[in-house]
């Protein structure tokens, strides 16, 4: 089992920044990769960013490239998502998820564990 807890969401004006954190725990945590997904109102959940175990490789959807940065701290078993230049269309519930696959085109069904999510609201 892997437990995931997100934090850092909130209300921010367009152009602002937020940093999301995902704290992971569990005996099998080291076997999994942690990714960020999001679900906007009325839309399906989508992959946002992923990072390899060592942090050397990162993956993003086109919509966030150059604005979002994913990082990880293996010593703290945490993964972060720094979000800059936020836009109203970034408004969504952001989830961290654990799975064994990595890449830019991951889907819900590729993940084995999910956090409960943290809401990010970007006002115009």
Image: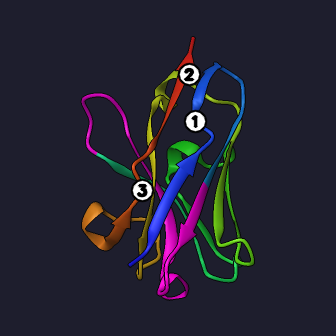
- Magenta stretch, residue numbers: 22-44
Give the numbered dot on residue 42: none
Q: Residue 10: image x %, image y %?
A: 58, 28
Name the one closer to the observer, 75 or 35. Answer: 75
Disc 3 versus disc 2: nearer the observer: 3
The answer to whether residue 11 is magenta is: no
- Of all residues, the one furthest to the top in this rendering is 124
Q: Residue 60: image x %, image y %?
A: 55, 57
Q: Residue 117: image x %, image y %?
A: 43, 46
SS class of the residue under badge 3? loop
- CA–CA distance between discs 3 and 2? 21 Å
Q: Residue at x 55, y 86 (%)?
A: 30
Name the one closer to the observer, 48 or 18. Answer: 18
The image quadrant where one finds the N terminus is bottom left
Between disc 3 and disc 2, whose residue precedes?
3
Query: In the rendered image, which residue does mark 3 sit on?
Result: 115
Query: In the rendered image, which residue does mark 1 sit on?
Result: 9
SS class of the residue under badge 1? loop
Between disc 1 and disc 3, whose residue precedes?
1
Query: In the rendered image, which residue does mark 2 sit on?
Result: 122
Between disc 1 and disc 2, whose residue precedes?
1
Few, some or many residues within 10 Å of mark 2 (<14, 14–19, 20+): many
Q: Residue at x 58, y 25 (%)?
A: 87
Residue contact between numbered discs 1 and 3, judged by CB atoms under 8 Å: no
Q: Residue at x 70, y 23 (%)?
A: 15
Q: Residue 29: image x %, image y %?
A: 51, 81
**Residue 72 horizontal side relative to residue 103, left or right:** right
Disc 1 versus disc 2: nearer the observer: 1
- CA–CA distance between discs 1 and 2? 10 Å
Q: Determine which quarter of the picture holds residue 113.
A: bottom left
Q: Determine which quarter of the picture holds residue 25.
A: bottom right
- CA–CA distance between discs 1 and 3? 13 Å
């Amino acid at each position: 089992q892997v437990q995931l807890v997100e934090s850092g969401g909130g209300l921010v004006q367009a152009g602002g920044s937020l940093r999301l954190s995902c704290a992971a725990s569990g005996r099998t945590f080291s076997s999994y990769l942690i990714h960020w997904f999001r679900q906007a109102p009325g839309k399906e959940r989508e992959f946002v960013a992923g990072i390899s175990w060592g942090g050397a490789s990162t993956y993003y959807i086109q919509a966030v490239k150059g604005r979002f940065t994913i990082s990880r701290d293996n010593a703290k078993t945490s993964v972060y998502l720094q979000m800059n230049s936020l836009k109203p269309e970034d408004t969504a519930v952001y989830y961290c998820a654990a799975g064994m696959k990595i890449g830019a085109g991951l889907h819900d069904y590729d993940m084995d564990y999910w956090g409960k999510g943290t809401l990010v609201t970007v006002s115009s």
